[in-house]
Amino acid sequence: MTEWGTDLDPAAVLQEYPRPQLVRDSYLNLNGYWEYAITAGGREEAPDAWDGQILVPFSPEAPLSGVGRQLQPSEALWYRRSFILPADFAGDTGVARERVMLHFGAVDQSCTVTVNGVPVGGHDGGYLPFSLDVTKALAGQPGAEQELVVRVRDISDTGYHSRGKQKLDRGGIWYTAQSGIWQTVWLESVPGKSIGGLALVPDLDSVTVTVQVSDAGTAGTASTGHGSIEADAAGTGSGAANGGESEDTGSGVAVPSEAGTPAGGADLSAEITVSAAGQTVARAVVVPGVPLRLAIPHPHVWTPEDPFLYDVQVRLLDGGREVDRVQSYTGLRTFGMGPDAAGRLRLLLNGRPYFHAGLLDQGYWPDGLYTAPSDAALASDIERARDLGFTMLRKHIKIEPLRWYYHCDRLGMLVWQDLVNGGTTYRHSVVTAPAVAGTHRRDNAYLAFGRDEEAGRAEFLAEMHGTVELLRNAVSLAVWVPFNEAWGQFDANAVTAQLRRLDPTRSVDHASGWHDQGGGDMKSLHVYFLPFRLRKAWLRGSRAVVLSEYGGYSLRIPGHTFNTKEFGYRSFRTRQALQRAYRRLHTRQIEPAVARGLAATVYTQLTDVEDEVNGLLTYDRAVLKIDAGTLREVNARLIRAAGG
C-alpha cells in the first residue's frame, strides 16, 4: 500500500478535473462507491441482486476497490449508481446548456451503458476515453434521481485486443490483469453547438490552432473527447476546406488570411485568446475547422528546465453571441533530429541537441494497479524522476489519464509514449530469444508475431489514431513508440508512415528492442544480458541510436515487496552493491557511448512492479534504493558527455 492509498478518502476519490486541455465550467464527478455484481458473461439484463460495493475508479482486482476478485473472460462485471444533477450544473457563464455528456476516462475492455434503463451507447478498447450523450435518457425534472448501469466484458490476454502487460497468469514481466472502470467517470452539460475539440500545434514563435465544433444534430460517441483533427507538418487540419496563416497586426492580435468553410454553420466563429501571467499576448477570431497560425510576440519557449505554459481561452460565437467557452494551455517548442557540433546525430529540442536521460515507467500501483490512488501520487512519480536528474519518462505499454501528461507539461518532463500492444499468443522465439541472439525477422510474418487476425491489426490502427488525437496537445510528448519487443508487431514501416501522417511533429521509435525494420527515426536497442557496445555502423546510419531499455538491476527491500518472488536482469543483496554496479555500468559503458553519439537512454526502471524488483523506487514508492546524489551525478555526466 502506498502512503496515498493509506490516506485515501472514499468520499473524495480523484476529484480533480480530468481533462486539463479542454476545461469547461460544468463538472460533476461520479467517482466513489457504486454497486457491483459479477455474473455469467452471457447475461444481458442487469442483475436482480448486487454483490456489494466497489470504489470507482479502481478495478475489482485492485485492493483499493474493496472487491479483490479477478474478472474472468467468461464473466460480466456490472456497475450501478444513481446521481442527481445539481441545480447549478449548467455552469456560471450564463450560456444555455442543452446536452448532458457522460464521460469515461477508460473502461477495460468492452462496455455498454444504460441510463434509467435506456441504452445510451458503449465502447470497445480499454485505454481510450469516450463520451456518451445521455440527454434523452434523463428522467423527470431537475433534482430527479437518475440510474446509471454499466456492463463490462474483459477477455484480457485470451484474444487479440490491446492489453498492455496484463496477463491472467501473471508473473515475471507480466502483471495482474485488471478490468472495468479504471479512470474517472464524470458528467458535463454543453450547449447544442459546442467546442468539441482543439488542436494546438506549437513551434518556437507561434501556435497553430484548429477549433472543432460539435453539433447536437450530429453528436454521438466520441472516442477521445477531443474530436478528430488530423494535422500536417504545417499544423493544418486534413478536414479543413481552406487553411492559411494569420496576419500579424503588430499588436499580438491575428486574423485569418483566408476564410474557410465553417465547420458548424456560416454564423459560427471562435475567438482565441492566448495569455501569459494573466496578460493577453495574442488574440484571433477564426472560422471553426480552419487552422490558424497565431504568432506569439516575444515568445517564451518550453523546456524541461523552464516548462513555461501559455493559457489559451476559446469562445465559440454564433452570430457574435457566446454559446460556449473552454480553457486550455500550450507551450512553445519543437522536436526533431539533427547533428551536434561534432556531426553526431542527436535528438533536438527547440532546434538544439538535447539528451534524453530516461526511465522506463510502467504506471502500476500496488494498491490501485492501473489507477494511481490520488492525483498527488500521479504527480509524485514525475517529480521524483525530475529531482533525480532524469529528463524523460518512457510511458511503457499504457496510456495514462490526461492529468499525468498535464503534470509532465507543467513540471518539465519529456515523454516517450508507447502504443498499447495486442495480438494473440506471443512466441518465445520471436519476443524473447532476440534479447540474446540478436536476430531480426520481417514483421509481415503475421502468425509468428501474433497478428494473424486482420481485425486485430485494424483495431490497433484505429486505436493508434485515437491515441494520437487524445495526446496531440501534450507539450511534453516527444516520441511515439508503436511497437516494443515484437509484442503484436506488424508492418512497422507502414504503421510508422501512417503515424507520421497523423502527427509529423514528433519523432518515431518504430520498433523498440528488436526486429528492426529499418524505419523510424531511431536505431532502438534493448541490452540487458551483454555489455553494451556502440557499433560504428549504427552511427553511420540516418537514424539516431538510442538505448531504449537497459539495466534492470534488482534489489529486494524487505517490507516493501509485492510477494516473495524476484525478477530482474542482475540481482544484488545490498544497496551499496547495487549503487556501485549502477555507477560502474554508466561510467564504463553508457557514458562513453553517449560521448560517441548515443542519443538517449532509458534505464529499467522507475519503480518495482509486482515480481520485478528492479526499480529505483520500491513498488510502494517508499524507498529509493540508490543514493539520490549518485543518480543526479550520473545523469549530469551523461548530459555533459552528450555536449549538454
Image (cartoon, rainbow, N blue to C red):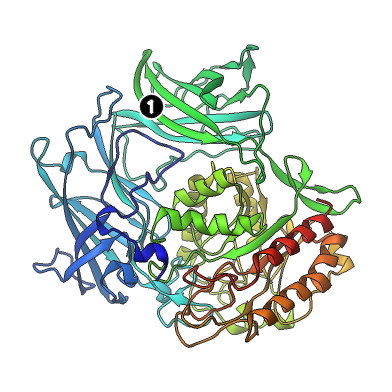
Query: Which residue does the numbered mark 1 point to in the structure image?
Result: 325
Which is more toward the observer, 434 or 413?
A: 413
Residue 439 appears in the rendering: no
Q: Residue at point 33% right, 33% down? A: 25
> In this image, 93 relative to 550: left or right?
left
Q: Residue at point 50% right, 74% down? A: 609
Residue 517, image x, y percentages = 71, 65
Which is more toward the observer, 117 or 297?
A: 297
Q: Secondary structure at mark 1?
A: strand
Q: The residue under label 1 is which amino acid type?
A: Arg
Residue farthest toward the right in the current orientation of the protein:
342
Q: Above or below — where is 219 with respect to 642?
A: above
Residue 453, image x, y percentages = 48, 69
Q: Residue at point 8% right, 67% down? A: 48
Q: Above or below — where is 315 with respect to 455?
A: above
Report which quarter residue 474 is drawn in: top right
> In this image, 518 relative to 186: left or right?
right
User: How busy is the neighbourhood of tag 1: few (under 14 within 10 Å), some, or many (20 plus)?
Assistant: many
Q: Residue at point 35% right, 29% down? A: 194
Q: Above or below — where is 458 with respect to 450?
A: above
Residue 141, image x, y percentages = 9, 35
> In this image, 335 relative to 293: left or right?
right
- Count of marks placed on residues: 1
